[in-house]
Amino acid sequence: PVQRIVERQVQIPQVQIVDEIVEVPVHKQMQVPMITKVQRTVEIPQVEFVETEVHVPVQKHRHVPMVTVVQRTIEVPQVEFVDRIVEVSVQKQVQVPMVTKQ
Protein backbone atom coordinates (compact mmCIF):
# COMPACT_ATOMS: atom_id res chain seq x y z
CA PRO A 1 0.00 0.00 0.00
CA VAL A 2 1.23 3.20 -1.05
CA GLN A 3 0.10 6.26 0.69
CA ARG A 4 -0.95 9.12 -1.38
CA ILE A 5 -1.72 12.60 -0.27
CA VAL A 6 -4.60 14.07 -2.10
CA GLU A 7 -5.86 17.53 -1.45
CA ARG A 8 -9.51 18.04 -1.45
CA GLN A 9 -11.88 20.64 -0.12
CA VAL A 10 -14.17 19.73 2.67
CA GLN A 11 -16.96 21.84 4.09
CA ILE A 12 -16.45 22.40 7.76
CA PRO A 13 -19.50 23.62 9.63
CA GLN A 14 -18.98 27.01 11.27
CA VAL A 15 -19.50 27.27 14.95
CA GLN A 16 -21.25 30.37 16.21
CA ILE A 17 -20.83 31.34 19.81
CA VAL A 18 -23.82 33.15 21.34
CA ASP A 19 -23.31 34.70 24.74
CA GLU A 20 -26.35 34.92 26.93
CA ILE A 21 -26.23 37.17 29.99
CA VAL A 22 -28.01 35.65 32.94
CA GLU A 23 -28.40 37.61 36.17
CA VAL A 24 -27.25 35.71 39.16
CA PRO A 25 -28.31 37.13 42.55
CA VAL A 26 -25.42 38.13 44.70
CA HIS A 27 -25.50 36.81 48.22
CA LYS A 28 -23.89 39.13 50.68
CA GLN A 29 -23.32 38.47 54.29
CA MET A 30 -24.31 41.29 56.57
CA GLN A 31 -24.05 41.53 60.28
CA VAL A 32 -27.45 42.20 61.84
CA PRO A 33 -27.39 43.75 65.29
CA MET A 34 -28.89 41.63 67.97
CA ILE A 35 -31.52 43.24 70.19
CA THR A 36 -31.74 42.10 73.74
CA LYS A 37 -34.37 43.20 76.23
CA VAL A 38 -33.19 43.97 79.70
CA GLN A 39 -35.69 44.34 82.51
CA ARG A 40 -35.03 47.00 85.06
CA THR A 41 -36.96 48.23 88.02
CA VAL A 42 -38.37 51.74 87.96
CA GLU A 43 -39.44 53.53 91.09
CA ILE A 44 -42.84 55.16 90.76
CA PRO A 45 -43.55 57.92 93.25
CA GLN A 46 -46.58 57.24 95.40
CA VAL A 47 -49.28 59.88 95.65
CA GLU A 48 -50.70 60.56 99.07
CA PHE A 49 -54.10 62.17 99.42
CA VAL A 50 -54.54 64.38 102.46
CA GLU A 51 -58.15 65.33 103.05
CA THR A 52 -59.07 68.38 105.07
CA GLU A 53 -62.58 69.49 105.86
CA VAL A 54 -63.57 72.89 104.54
CA HIS A 55 -66.65 74.65 105.81
CA VAL A 56 -68.89 75.72 102.95
CA PRO A 57 -71.52 78.30 103.90
CA VAL A 58 -75.11 77.31 103.25
CA GLN A 59 -76.82 79.41 100.65
CA LYS A 60 -80.44 80.28 101.26
CA HIS A 61 -82.89 81.15 98.56
CA ARG A 62 -85.24 84.01 99.21
CA HIS A 63 -88.05 85.33 97.12
CA VAL A 64 -87.55 88.98 96.31
CA PRO A 65 -90.62 90.85 95.05
CA MET A 66 -90.27 92.21 91.56
CA VAL A 67 -90.95 95.89 91.06
CA THR A 68 -92.44 96.80 87.74
CA VAL A 69 -92.80 100.34 86.49
CA VAL A 70 -95.91 101.13 84.49
CA GLN A 71 -96.45 104.43 82.74
CA ARG A 72 -99.95 105.88 82.68
CA THR A 73 -101.23 109.12 81.34
CA ILE A 74 -103.39 111.12 83.68
CA GLU A 75 -105.18 114.36 83.05
CA VAL A 76 -104.19 117.22 85.29
CA PRO A 77 -106.63 120.11 85.43
CA GLN A 78 -105.03 123.35 84.31
CA VAL A 79 -105.20 126.27 86.68
CA GLU A 80 -105.22 129.76 85.19
CA PHE A 81 -103.92 132.65 87.23
CA VAL A 82 -105.41 136.05 86.46
CA ASP A 83 -103.48 138.96 87.99
CA ARG A 84 -105.23 142.22 88.80
CA ILE A 85 -103.56 145.31 89.95
CA VAL A 86 -105.25 146.73 93.00
CA GLU A 87 -104.22 149.99 94.55
CA VAL A 88 -103.60 149.77 98.22
CA SER A 89 -103.37 152.96 100.26
CA VAL A 90 -100.13 153.27 102.11
CA GLN A 91 -100.18 154.62 105.62
CA LYS A 92 -97.12 156.41 106.78
CA GLN A 93 -96.21 157.21 110.29
CA VAL A 94 -94.60 160.58 110.68
CA GLN A 95 -93.09 161.98 113.87
CA VAL A 96 -94.61 165.34 114.58
CA PRO A 97 -92.79 167.54 117.12
CA MET A 98 -94.87 168.60 120.06
CA VAL A 99 -95.19 172.26 120.77
CA THR A 100 -95.68 173.25 124.41
CA LYS A 101 -96.90 176.77 125.52
CA GLN A 102 -95.38 178.64 128.40
Image (tube, rainbow, N blue to C red):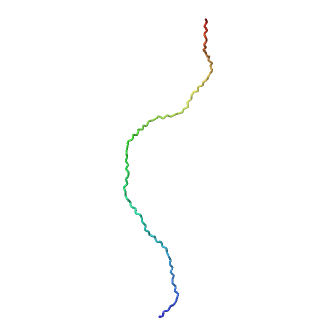
Residue sitting at the far top? 102
- Quadrant (top left, top right, bottom left, bottom right) of the C terminus: top right
Q: Is residue 87 left or right of residue 47?
A: right
**Which image quadrant is residue 33 in?**
bottom left
The residue closer to the viewer here, 31 or 60, is 31
Query: How many callouts does the rendering have?
Result: 0
Task: Examine the rendered structure and indicate whether residue 37 appears above or below residue 82.
Answer: below
Task: Examine the rendered structure and indicate whether residue 90 appears above or below residue 79.
Answer: above
Residue sitting at the far front? 102
Q: Is residue 18 left or right of residue 31?
A: right
The residue closer to the viewer here, 27 or 78, is 27
- Residue 45, image x, y percentages: 38, 51
- Residue 23, image x, y percentages: 47, 71
The residue closer to the viewer here, 56 or 70, is 56
- Residue 11, image x, y percentages: 52, 85
Task: Examine the rendered structure and indicate whether residue 100 appears above or below residue 77.
Answer: above
